[in-house]
Image (cartoon, grey):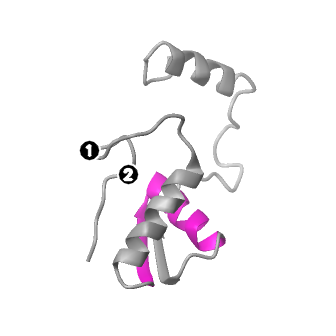
Amino acid sequence: MFTYDRRGRGDSGNTAPYAIDREVEDIDALIQEAGGSACLFGMSSGAALALEAANRGLAIRKLAVYEAPFIVDASRPPIPDDFLTRLNGLVASDRDRMP
């Protein structure tokens, strides 16, 4: 069994700029280290990455995801139109929370 810290989290380093492609490459490297195929579990944003890895055709035999951060119905209000602008401003100012 392998567990890992995603880029920029825990003991893992991070190479700017952030890219989903790099995270999927990390997952693929772990799959190769594990023997070329794997059963994959992802939780929260890790679930989204696990789904993306499977979508890109990585050698995933089984996939389990929990609490992927997707809203697929009208149970919550939509993200505000200025969300990305506000988020980019917070990232630029080294803040990690939306006001």
Q: Which residue is mark 2?
A: 6
Residue at the image point whose x is 43% and y is 17% from the top: 94
Image position, residue 12 (x, y; %): 30, 46
Q: In which quadrant will I find the N terminus?
A: bottom left
Horizontal side of 3 relative to 21 (left or right) equals left
Q: Circle 1 sits on which residue?
A: 10
Q: Nearer the viewer, residue 62 or 72?
A: 62
Q: Is residue 87 visible?
A: yes
Q: Position of residue 75 (x, y in %)?
A: 65, 48
Q: Residue at x 28, y 71 (%)?
A: 2
The structure residue drawn at horizontal position 70% and vertical position 28%, both measured from the top left corner, is: 80
Marks 2 and 1, how far apart in space? Answer: 8 Å
Q: Can residue 69 be spotted in the picture?
A: no
**Label 1: which secondary element:** loop
Q: Which residues are magenta?
A: 37-55
Q: Nearer the viewer, residue 93 or 30?
A: 30
Q: Position of residue 33 (x, y in %)?
A: 35, 76
Instruction: Indicate whether 60 appears above or below 93.
Output: below
| Element under disc 2 | loop
Q: Position of residue 64 (x, y in %)?
A: 46, 75
Judge whether residue 52 is colored magenta: yes
Asked if labels 1 and 2 touch by Cβ distance under 8 angstroms, the answer is yes
Residue 30 lies, with reference to residue 59, above or below; the image says: above
Q: Amino acid at mark 1?
A: Gly
Q: Is residue 33 left or right of residue 11?
A: right
Crowd class of label 1 (few under 14; some 14 to 19; many from 20; radius 10 Å): few
Q: Which mark is residue 75?
A: none
Three-letter residue code for mark 2: Arg
Residue 58 placement, left or right of 31: right
